[in-house]
Every structure is written in structure tokens, then in C-alpha cells.
Image (tube, rainbow, N blue to C red):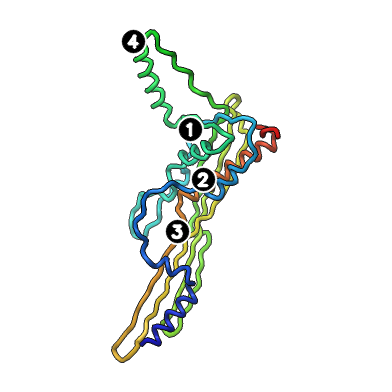
Amino acid sequence: MKKTITITIAILMLLSGCSTLGKLIPPSQQSAMSLEPTEIFSDLKNLPKPAGSIPVSVYSFRDQTGQYKPQTNVSSFSTAVTQGANSILVQALHESDWFTPVEREGLQNILTERKIIRAAQSENPNSVELPPLTTAKIILEGGIISYDTNVKTGGLGMEYFGIGASELYREDAISIYLRAVDVRTGQILLSVATSKKVLSQEMRAGFFRYVSYKRLAEAEGGFSDNEPMSICVTQAIEKALTDLVTKGIDKGLWAQKAA
């Protein structure tokens, strides 16, 4: 019995790797934390410094795929892609040095508050007049235009005398289109497209064996690892912004800061 368990543990460690054994232990509760910048965001921050920040507006940057999460034998209305791409794009614009985003998604709320302020100021003749809203020079349009599932699938497994392990993976892909439109002329200045693969993997290991007459030993373990869809959308958007700035510099649409 002990010999069988020892062999089993050795095979599982060989197939799974010592670094993955810690993933089999359920994680403890964690406090909320700030989102860490992605690797793509560092490319956006490392772009040349601009000669001046460009005011931009985003009215709608949404999921245009219309796909729902696939679930077996269940009707699900949960979308496969985040519906908050507009907020992700505005956040990336705000964190970059090249653009100054102006609020347009909640424009009606701003106008309502300004009306309230004007109504209160009408009773005070010494009040300071509200400044005009900042106008944008460029409108950013586009969205998430595709979400393809099972672009690539595969796996690897091994079993010997009821002792085995297997690993499966699946790749999905999302695509982002982003274009810059000149507010004065309506001309599309630039259009870029990016894609990001979404990786999901699952690993299982276990054994199933009779160790003696009428005595059966069975054990199994495993874990799955799925890339968060919101993080993948964030990386695709940040990559699109990086390409947009780079192509704009090459075409002379905007200038970098002089050395």
C-alpha cells in the first residue's frame, strides 16, 4: 500500500511539476486591491512624450459581438464579453500622457448639474459664471467586434496501471477596432485593430487501483486557470491606443515633445 502511494506521488509530481501542487490548495480570502498595470500598459507609458495633450471624447465603445456565455443545456443571458469597454478605454486615456478624455457618456448628468448650479447662482448676483465645457478635437469610435471561441484546443495525458495525469487547454480570441475621427471635418484620421488570445487550461491527476482483495484506492486532484476576460479586453484596448499614437506620429497627425 505504501509503495503504491509513493509511486503515485512521484508520478504526479513528475507530470504536474512541484510549482503546480500549491494550486491544489484552496486559496484563503483576500481583501480588495488595486488593479495592477498590464504589460501592454507599460508600452503605452513608455511612448515618447507628447508636445501637448489632445482632448478626446468617447461616446460609445461597446461589445458588438452580441455573444452570450456558452453553458450546456442552460439558457444563459450573461454576456461573454465585458460591457464596460467604454470605461476601460476612458481609464487608459486618462492614464496616458497623450490624451485628455472629456466626459460624454454621462454628459446629460453634467448638463443637469450645471442647470442646478445656474439656478442657484441666479439668486446671487455676485456669483462667478460657469466656464464652458471643454471641447474635444478627436472622437474615438469602435468597439469589440469579434469573440471567437475554441480557436485552438488540445491536451496531453498519460495513464499507467490506473495512475495518470492529463492537461487540457483552450484558446479563445477577441478583436478590437479603434478609430480616431476629426471633430471639425468628420474625417477618419486613423483606424487600428488589435487581437488578444484568451487562454484557459485545466490539469487533473489521480489514480484508481485495487491495492488488495476488495480494497480499492482512489484519489484525484486538479485545477483550472482562466484568463479574466476584462483583463484581456484591457490589454487589447491599451495595445490599440499604443498603435494609434505610434501611427499618428508617423503620419504627422500629432507631434512628440522636442528633445
Tag 2, which secondary structure?
strand
Q: What amino acid type is highlighted by mark number 1? A: Tyr
Q: Earlier in the sequence, mark 1 or mark 2?
A: 1
Are circles 3 and 1 on residues that touch, CB within 8 Å?
no
Extreme-top residue of the structure: 125
Are circles 4 and 1 on residues that touch, CB within 8 Å?
no
Q: Which residue does the image show at 35% across and 87% down from the upper left?
A: 210
Tag 3, which secondary structure?
strand
Q: Which mark is residue 59?
A: 1
Q: Earlier in the sequence, mark 3 or mark 2?
A: 2
- Marks 3 and 4, how far apart at CA: 58 Å
- Marks 3 and 2, how far apart at CA: 22 Å
Which residue corresponds to mark 4? Answer: 123
Which residue corresponds to mark 3? Answer: 226
Q: What amino acid type is highlighted by mark number 4? A: Glu
Q: Earlier in the sequence, mark 3 or mark 4?
A: 4
